[in-house]
Amino acid sequence: MQQLNSLIREASDLAMGTPESEADRMLQICNACRYCEGFCAVFPAMTRRIEFTPSVVYYLANLCHNCGACLHACQYAPPHEFAVNIPMVMAQLRKETYMSYAWPRMMGELYKINGVAVALSASVSVMVFLLLALALNGKFFGGVLDGNFYAVFPHNTLVMIFGIVFGFAILALAIGLTRFWQEMSPGRASGGAVAEATHDALTLKYLGGGHGDGCNNEDDAFSLWRKRFHHFTFYGFMLCFAATSVATIYHYFLGLHAPYALNSLPVILGTLGGVGLVIGPVGLLYLNIQRDPAHGDRSQKPMDRAFIVLLLLISISGLGLLAYRDTVSMSIWLVVHLGFVMGLFLTMPYGKFAHGFYRLAALLKNSIEKRQKNHLQFGAD
């Protein structure tokens, strides 16, 4: 009976088609209709093609920002028998992209299970290890250390441990992204193409919806809040990265060692970034919970929320560490913060963090091909 049920499920999956075949079917319909051609970059890029191979649909999927506008504008959307749902199939394809190009390839399966439980388990495991280290060294409550984190864990030890994990995460992302880039056959990038893609990414141009009114979230009403919360999250993250970079310059090149004063540049940048990383993730998590299931792939909810929750916990623990750095509980706050940061690093190559890099590559490909000569006469190949 179990084998029969398995065969029935396989037959059902075949009947429904793979995300790649479904995207091909839907895009052929869209290419004939073209009502949504002015909505975002996906549809002009679509009209430059007459075939939709897996590499093409992966590119278009990562060019899609999932604003949802095309679903509510489409006359062939469900319950029509054509059942055209571009946001959903593009979301499914994005997960397929991450899995297909992951390095090592066997780790691509983690995209299926990367959820809040996995991310938090990784973080808690690191916290337990660090707490044991504190207990063995007699520093569980090390007294008031005047905000000196390195009196708890040596600077070089932290740099080595976190540097190795972060280095592997960046290497894994870089290899996957290189594979994706090569299969897109993007052509040569000019300065203008790079500038346009960078502008589109930094301004989140395509989260403005088809007419600049924003995204559809719970229904067909437009809102710019998803774009705004993305901005808080992205620029909050970049401010925190800038704080770390400035602190590195202070430490290695200027001989200025932590702890830094509250009015110092690293602390100001980190505080502003932490606030952004509270506002942004809280808003995105709320919108994600309220979002119409038809706007995306339900199976990716755990991955989406894991990334949002981790960023939120990193920012809250970081701000808590700053607030209590001159108290006896500083070492505990440090352990909690480092645990969440390591949890992000461990899941980074196989979670939602990757989507920003793939999307930037797709935006650059789009900018390049718009400048290429069009041998089809109605777009670039």
Image (cartoon, rainbow, N blue to C red):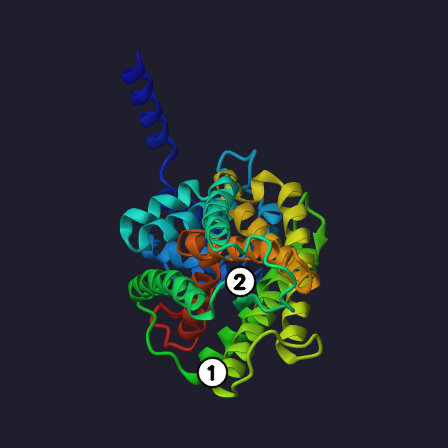
Q: Relative to 210, is 114 on the left or the right?
A: left
Residue 225 at what x, y percent from top left?
70, 57
Going from the N terminus, do you reach mark 2 or mark 1 first? 2
Image quadrant containing the C terminus: bottom left
Residue 215 at what x, y percent from top left?
65, 54
Residue 263 at what x, y percent from top left?
71, 78
Q: Quadrant of residue 147?
A: bottom right
Q: Which residue is more in the foreground, 365 or 328?
A: 328
Q: Is residue 309 above or below residue 159?
A: above
Image quadrant containing the N terminus: top left
Q: Quadrant of residue 292?
A: top right
The residue tagged 1 is: 252
Q: Which residue is more in the foreground, 364 or 158?
A: 158
Residue at 51% x, 80% y: name it.
251
Q: Amino acid at mark 2?
A: Val
Q: Amino acid at mark 1?
A: Tyr
Residue 190 at what x, y percent from top left?
40, 82
Q: Relative to 246, is 287 on the left or the right?
A: right
Total marks in image:
2
Q: Relative to 93, is 149 on the left or the right?
A: right
Nearest to the eye among marks 2 and 1: give it: 2
The residue tagged 2 is: 152
Residue at the extreme top of the image, as rendered: 1
Q: Which residue is more in the foreground, 61 or 110?
A: 110
- Under circle 2, the secondary element is loop
